[in-house]
Amino acid sequence: MLRSSKAGLSTDRAAGESMALSALTFLAADARRLERFLSVTGLGPGNLRAAAAGAGFSASVLGYVVGDEPLLVRFAAEAGIAPEDVVRALTALEGPPPQGS
């Protein structure tokens, strides 16, 4: 389970990174899902590897999945987790919202 305390931040981030990798694997397992992901993100075979190494990539993968409810539900079901767990993982990767918002 992802926690929001500072003590659990590195664990939360690691869990979020792991879930993002699972989500990317899920997307890549289906040609249509992968094609749509690449189209929406502007990524392609030539720059996907470099993008994956960049900061924020994991959050962007989960953000993409969370932004499409049917896709989120399908991914969560296949991963054996609740959709809310994906949202929490995204929040852990993005960090806390800025103060005053």
Image (cartoon, grey):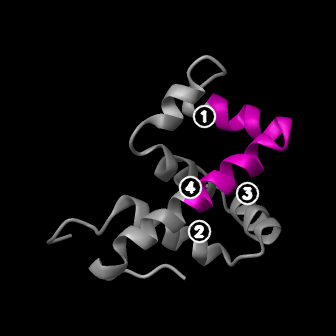
What residue does disc 1 label? 40
Q: Residue at x 20, y 65 (%)?
A: 98
Depicted 97 relative to depicted 54: above or below = below
Residue 27: image location, x then y, percent: 74, 46
What residue does disc 4 label? 62
Nearest to N terminus: mark 2 or mark 1: 1
What residue does disc 3 label? 71
Nearest to N terminus: mark 3 or mark 1: 1
Contact between labelled residues 2 and 3, with CB atoms less than 8 Å apart: no
Contact between labelled residues 4 and 2, with CB atoms less than 8 Å apart: yes
Residue 7: image location, x then y, percent: 30, 81
Amino acid residing under circle 4: Leu
Q: Nearer the viewer, residue 4 or 97?
A: 4
Position of the C terminus by quadrant: bottom left
Tell me the distance, in whole angstroms, between the alpha carbons under discs 2 and 1: 20 Å
Q: Is residue 38 magenta?
A: yes
Location of residue 37 by image quarter: top right
The secondary structure type at the circle numbered 4 is: helix
Tell me the distance, in whole angstroms, between the alpha carbons under discs 3 and 1: 14 Å
Tell me the distance, in whole angstroms, between the alpha carbons under discs 4 and 3: 11 Å
What residue does disc 2 label? 86
